[in-house]
């Protein structure tokens, strides 16, 4: 089955089998609550990844990865029989499209982030290559996590486009574009990047913005140092591997010490090799932190949207106030505010009564419209603040829960590493005793 | 006559230095005078038959090296070490002695011992000069390491059934500084010693013709051993380096969690907990690295030096045999001076036998020591690693416990044990 852009030639390069990873997958995604939203009705998973080649839009050969999304209605499973799931293939760019659509359509929601497009903060042994199977695997897990988060979000889970993403392979892209979200996306982008000053932002959003900035800084730093620590730890363990080789060679020339040395060497080799598993597990921890690092962007986006709405409200209110001011001046004849009209009338004489009347009427019309606009903007702003803050509170709870879990799992990993170390060195010590 | 701590002013200067330098070159010497020494020792020859635990059960001499002190004179600055001896041996006038010795004195002693017993295996001294990458000469660590090595050297000599009976050893342990200086001046003069060096070189160039199989086997072993122990030394030093770098990064890791906790509310507890754990683990890591540096590295390093000593011993044995073989050939070819030559050849032949027995006897002893030393060092290292991991595990488990206690829904997940 194919992904979107219908390339001319499709070559399936390799199927990256991930059965053992499903185990990891369970560990990884149990943070997402299975009894919420869409997940109550269906099981969702990103089961596999495959490499494809094809010609892209500019008719050039490219290699890309596609991911298999499997869905299965929940009730069919409880009947004891597990029917084959429905499935379709999607590539990373389609996930991006889905997310952009959601961001634009639900600006008050803190939308879950996607996993990294490119491997960025990695320690040196880990490949920074997008085609590397380990990277692809971790991305698969991240994509699944994204889908699950969206699926159990109280608002997002009801979205039709999201549902189609999971179920309609063909024509999904067209559906998305048909919603006209692109125009909204463009104007949103412009607005997000515009510079404007808000007079009375909601203090909570200002604080939230500061928090997101702090969290982003600290998590970036944490991930960078963690990668360096992993690098060093790798070095320590791997150098021990040399002992094994030398012990083995040395044991060949010794009589009494030979056996002890040889077997001790074997254990030290085991020690050296154990670091690979240890660091692989730690990557999951890093991924959990990364998710929240990327979440800070979503948080900032919501804050920005609030500022925008607030700004529009303030602008509308300001417009209204100035119109009212103008009307008052017209009525009372006093000119408080400087205006070209005022100047010219001073210079060239007053206007006629009809002219004044016409202007007054126009102004009153504008004031009426203005008041409507302000009412609307007010409601918009209030609604936004209310819904956004609800979602943010949920997010905060989720974040505290997830990160606490992550820290605990880090501790568990450290304990496991220590236990392995104790085991290996106890064995080695026994062998040394026999020397 | 117990020694006392010597005032730097009394310390001799130039001649002492020269003597010490020459003594370093005396390794390949064979002195005719030593025949006297040899025959004296011959009465103790039965000592060669010792098999199992000798000195340890009947240890009657205890030596310690400690208390390094700096001495500054007009010409140089150097360190002296206190050498304390406690003994019940009758050869010693007193039961306790305290003297101060500098590195040159140890060098002198080693030279004398090797001179007197060219095919006995004398424990190596720490290096004269600092190897690249290590700390400077008067740094505390360097002095401490050297002091420990000097202590081991003297103890090995004291434990050796033959070497510990050496007169030079006794003088070293008991003489006052000025007494030692004048004692050192005795013996063959500079010129005769230089002549002997030349002879030694000539012998080694000549080479040995009929080396007994067992000594060839020994040589092969020593080369392989030297190779392996050098590798182990390098590997261990590399591990120390990597550990230190790991520690460096780890020290930066913990504080970030603390920093993070400043932005959080609910997560303050766990974040500070993790930061604390990492800090404790840093301390444990530091201790572990120190253990490696203090125990395993010096031991391996000493055995690297040992293997060089062994090679020298084998060379000296070969030279003794070469000299005999040369004389033997001369005996066969020359027609004149047959009697004198025969006497000389016989003497040299005895010497060869003597040298071979000495080495054979000492070889087993050395192997046992080596095995004991290295085994003990590796066991200590393994144990330290176990301790390290046990302590770290306890740290993290305490944290985990604290989290599970006040965590509502907790992580009854995989208990990856």
Image (cartoon, grey):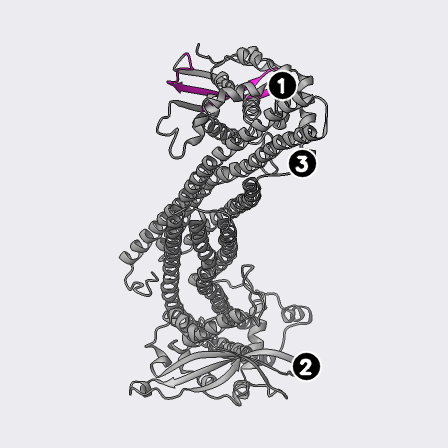
Near-viewer residue (B327 or A239): B327
Q: Are marks 1 and 3 on the same chain?
A: yes
- Along the viewing direction, whichever of B300 and B139 lies nearer the viewer: B300
Instruction: Give the class, few, some or many, for how many residues have Cα within 10 Å of label 3's Cα (few <14, many ≥20).
Output: some
**Label 2 vs label 1: CA separation?**
83 Å
Cα distance in 3D space between marks 3 and 2: 75 Å
Callout 3: SS: loop
Residue B83 in percent (x, y) is at 46, 20
**Stretch of the chain drawn in magenta:** B65-93
Q: Which residue position holds label 1?
A: B19
Residue drawn at x 67%, y 25% is: B197
Can you give x and y, in whole percent of width and height, for residue A366 in the image?
53, 78
**First of labels 1, 3 by sequence position:** 1
Tell me the crowding category of disc 2: few under 14, some 14 to 19, or many 20 or more residues within 10 angstroms, Cα based. few
On screen, residue B414 above or below B160: below
Eyeballing the image, is B94 above or below B162? above
Q: Residues within 10 Å of mark 1 (few under 14, many from 20)?
A: some
Label 2: which residue? A60
- Residue drawn at the location 43% of the way across and 61% of the way down: A203
Image coordinates for residue A299, horizontal then vertical, percent: 47, 66
Cα distance between the residues tagged 1 and 3 = 29 Å
Residue A328 at least partly seen: no
Asked if the residue under mark 2 is in contact with the one under mark 3, i.e. CB atoms within 8 Å, the reply is no
Q: Is residue B80 magenta?
A: yes
Discs 3/2, front = 3
């Amino acid at each position: 089955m194919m992904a979107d852009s219908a390339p001319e030639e499709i070559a399936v390069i390799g199927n990256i089998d991930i059965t053992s990873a499903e185990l990891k997958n369970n560990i990884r995604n149990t943070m997402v609550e299975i009894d919420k939203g869409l997940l109550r009705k269906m099981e969702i998973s990103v089961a596999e990844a495959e490499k494809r080649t094809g010609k892209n839009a500019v008719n050039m050969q490219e290699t890309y990865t596609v991911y298999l999304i499997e869905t299965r209605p929940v009730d069919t499973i409880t009947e004891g029989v597990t029917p084959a799931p429905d499935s379709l293939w999607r590539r990373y760019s389609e996930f991006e499209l889905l997310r952009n659509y959601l961001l634009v359509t639900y600006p008050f929601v803190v939308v879950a982030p996607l996993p990294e497009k490119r491997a960025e903060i990695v320690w040196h042994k880990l490949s920074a290559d997008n085609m590397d199977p380990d990277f692809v695997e971790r991305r698969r897990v991240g994509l699944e996590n994204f889908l699950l988060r969206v699926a159990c979000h109280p608002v997002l889970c009801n979205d039709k486009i999201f549902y189609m993403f999971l179920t309609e392979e063909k024509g999904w892209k067209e559906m998305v574009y048909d919603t006209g979200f692109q125009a909204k996306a463009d104007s949103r982008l412009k607005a997000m990047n515009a510079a404007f000053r808000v007079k009375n932002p909601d203090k909570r959003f200002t604080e939230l913005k500061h928090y997101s900035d702090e969290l982003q800084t600290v998590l970036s730093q944490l991930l960078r140092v963690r990668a360096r620590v992993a690098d060093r730890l790798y070095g320590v363990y791997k150098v021990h591997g040399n002992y094994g080789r030398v012990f083995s060679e040395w044991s060949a020339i010794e009589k009494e010490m030979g056996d002890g040395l040889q077997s001790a060497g074997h254990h030290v080799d085991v020690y050296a090799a154990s670091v690979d598993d240890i660091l692989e597990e730690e990557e999951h921890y890093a991924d959990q932190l990364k998710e929240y690092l990327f979440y800070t962007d979503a948080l900032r986006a919501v804050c920005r949207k609030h500022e925008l709405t607030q700004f529009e409200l303030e602008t509308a209110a300001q417009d209204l106030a100035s119109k009212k001011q103008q009307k008052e001046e017209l009525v009372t004849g006093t000119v408080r505010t400087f205006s070209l009209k005022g100047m010219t009338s001073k210079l060239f004489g007053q206007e006629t009564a009809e002219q004044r009347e016409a202007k007054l009427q126009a102004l009153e019309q504008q004031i009426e419209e203005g008041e409507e606009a302000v009412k609307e903007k007010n409601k918009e702003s209030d609604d936004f603040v209310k819904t956004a803050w609800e979602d943010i509170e949920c997010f905060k709870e989720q974040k505290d829960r997830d990160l606490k879990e992550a820290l605990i799992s880090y501790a568990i990993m450290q304990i496991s590493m220590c236990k392995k170390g104790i085991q290996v060195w106890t064995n080695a010590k026994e062998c040394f005793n026999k020397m | 006559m117990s020694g006392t701590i010597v005032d730097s002013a009394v310390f001799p200067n130039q001649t002492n230095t020269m003597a010490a330098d020459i003594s370093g070159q005396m390794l390949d010497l064979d002195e005719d005078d030593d025949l006297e020494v040899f025959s004296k020792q011959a009465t103790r020859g039965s000592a060669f038959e010792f098999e199992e635990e000798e000195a340890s059960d009947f240890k009657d001499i205890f030596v310690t090296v400690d208390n390094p002190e700096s001495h500054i004179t007009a010409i140089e600055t150097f360190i002296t070490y206190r050498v304390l001896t406690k003994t019940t041996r009758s050869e010693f006038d007193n039961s306790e002695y305290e003297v101060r010795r500098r590195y040159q004195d140890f060098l002198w002693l080693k030279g004398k011992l090797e001179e007197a017993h060219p095919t006995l295996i004398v424990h190596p001294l720490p290096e004269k000069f600092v190897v690249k990458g290590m700390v400077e000469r008067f740094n505390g660590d360097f002095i401490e390491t050297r002091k420990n090595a000097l202590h081991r050297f003297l103890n090995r000599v004291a434990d050796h059934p033959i070497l510990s009976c050496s007169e030079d050893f006794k003088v070293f342990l008991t003489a006052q500084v000025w007494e030692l200086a004048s004692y050192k001046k005795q013996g063959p003069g500079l010129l005769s010693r230089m002549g002997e060096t030349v002879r030694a070189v000539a012998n080694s160039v000549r080479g040995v013709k009929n080396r007994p199989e067992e000594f060839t086997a020994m040589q092969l072993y020593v080369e392989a051993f030297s190779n392996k122990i050098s590798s182990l030394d390098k590997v261990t030093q590399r591990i120390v380096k990597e550990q230190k770098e790991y520690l460096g990064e780890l020290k930066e890791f913990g504080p970030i969690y603390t920093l993070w906790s400043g932005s959080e509310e609910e997560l303050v507890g766990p974040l500070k907990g993790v930061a604390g754990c990492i800090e404790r683990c840093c301390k444990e890591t530091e201790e572990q690295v120190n253990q490696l540096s203090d125990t395993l590295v010096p031991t391996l390093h000493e055995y690297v030096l040992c293997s060089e000593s062994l090679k020298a011993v084998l060379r000296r044995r070969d030279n003794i045999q070469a000299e005999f073989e040369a004389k033997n050939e001369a005996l066969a070819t020359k027609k004149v001076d047959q009697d004198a030559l025969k006497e000389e050849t016989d003497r040299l032949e005895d010497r060869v036998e003597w040298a071979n027995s000495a080495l054979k006897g000492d070889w087993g002893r050395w192997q046992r020591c080596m095995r004991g030393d290295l085994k003990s060092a590796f066991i200590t290292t393994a144990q330290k690693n176990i301790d390290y991991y046990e302590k770290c595990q306890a740290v993290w488990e305490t944290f985990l416990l604290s989290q599970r206690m006040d965590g509502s829904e907790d992580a009854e997940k995989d208990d990856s044990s």
